[in-house]
Image: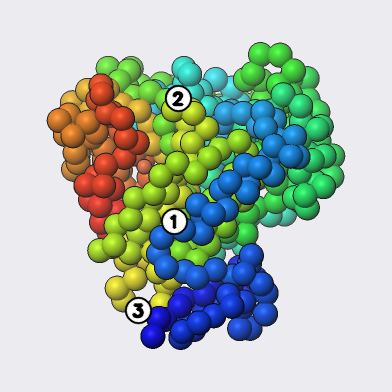
Amino acid sequence: MVMNKLICSKCMAVHFVEGETDGSCPTCHLDEHHVYNFRNSDEFLEKEVPRVLEERLDLGLQGLAGGLSFVIISTEPDRQREAVAEFLRYTDFIYSDGFEDDSFRTCVLEAADSPAVLIRSRKAGTNPFSSFNTAPKAGHLPNTRLETFVFSTPDLGRYSSIQSSRGVHFQEESILDTDSMLFTQTIPSHFHGCSFGFVQWKGESGNFRTPGSSGLDWEFEKPSSAHLNRIFELDHTATRVHAQQRDEAIIEFMELTNYNFSLAIYVKGFNSITSVARLSEKDFAMVFTSGILPDNGQEDVGPTEQFIRNYGTRVHHLAFRTEEIDSTYKALINDGMEFLLELVGSPEEGLQQTFSLGSPNTLLVNEYIQRYGGFDGFFTSGNVTLLTESTGRQ
Ligand SMILES: [Fe+2]
């Protein structure tokens, strides 16, 4: 007799049903569009992806969401300065502007050919992300997370009107209109607590100042270390989501952007799937990592679901493209950076990577990644296995 594992997207419960099933949720009685047989495969996703692509075309969303323009990382007010200093020390980003308005104090970090990184803290108002920041190892930093991924759009009015008609909720009723951009962002995703923002630049991108803001008098010294010249743009980020929400998190992301599901690497021994969504081969890639099986409350849940137990669903790491990674890795160690594991992979395999320890100021891990000429995959399963294992040490 076949044992089916049904996951309901409404009640989020896992139901074990023996034998034939009509695919509806035994609790909510939702039909099979909302309930699917959870068999640790890409079957459901492969069925849904063509539907999402068709819907994007029908709604006129194709071409309305472009590449990643910037990300917003929120910190506690008293850790913001240290978070910026640390970012300058361990990446090639420079501090290009700082300003504050009534709501936020914002530091802008930029690197060539890369999405920018805004590190900011809240000065007033409620934090719509706070309910996602309560896990045992994250609760002491209730305002800290990578909050928003901001993608460019050629027509924000049209984009937000189409998405609103689909039932997408934005944080503010009206679009923020500054000298240089139009901006809006969704409420945090139920699946991982990150928001998706959209920006329409009026001219050159890169002026983030808001109306009524004034310049910050903070100064930062950019280290002149030669190895920082071998660290480049933001290559990808990885967001941890629960096993039973993995498919829906990817579908939600595809429905909000023009990204497509690209590939998934299953690491069965560690109950982990690394799923990659891409816009093009050159663009920033969005990675979601989840369990294969849901967290059953047991000890051996695997490092990915264990991370979520400890830190909640959130972005786990920012990956930076790196050259001469061997010497760069050693130079970072000499400069005091600590790592979860040694370099994995090799030039022969086409890929080398490593993870730093999580930052005490942002909770984010830095990944350094070098792909070698001729490597046509995005990841290798050998590296993904070792990297996944290392996160069990967090
Ligand atoms: Fe990664």
Q: In the rendered image, which quarter contains the N terminus?
A: bottom left
Whether residue 342 sits left or right of residue 152 in the image: it is left
Q: Is residue 326 left or right of residue 230?
A: left
Mark closest to the chain's N terminus, 1 or 3: 1
Disc 1 to disc 3, C-alpha distance: 25 Å
Could you tell me which residue is drawn at 46 percent across and 50 percent down?
288
Q: Are marks 1 and 3 in contact (CB under 8 Å)?
A: no
Q: Nearer the viewer, residue 88 or 152?
A: 152
Q: Is residue 41 visible?
A: yes
Marks 2 & 3, CB-CB < 8 Å contact: no
Nearer to us in this view, 18 or 362: 18
Spatial separation of the CA atoms under disc 1 and disc 2? 24 Å
Question: In terms of depth relative to the viewer, which is nearer, 284 or 299?
Answer: 284
Image: 230 above or below 271: above
- Give x and y (percent) for residue 27: 63, 83
Q: What separation in Å lies between label 2 and label 3 (alpha carbons)?
A: 40 Å
Give, as a three-letter code, the residue at label 1. Answer: Asp
Amino acid type of the residue tagged 2 in the rendering:
Lys
Q: Residues within 10 Å of mark 1 (few under 14, many from 20)?
A: some
The label nearer to you, 2 versus 3, is 2
Disc 3: which residue: 298
Image location of residue 168, percent across then percent down = 75, 50
Q: Nearer the viewer, mark 1 or mark 2?
A: 1
Disc 2: which residue = 282
The residue carrying pointer 3 sits among few (fewer than 14), some (14 to 19) or many (20 or more) residues within 10 Å by Cα, namely few
Dot 1 corresponds to which residue?
42
Q: Residue 155 location, x and y as percent?
A: 76, 27
The residue located at (46%, 58%) in the rendering is 43
Q: Earlier in the sequence, mark 2 or mark 3?
A: 2
Q: Where in the image, quadrant-wise, is ligand 1 located? A: top left
Do labels 1 and 2 touch, CB within 8 Å? no
Residue at 25% of width from left, 23% of height from top? 374
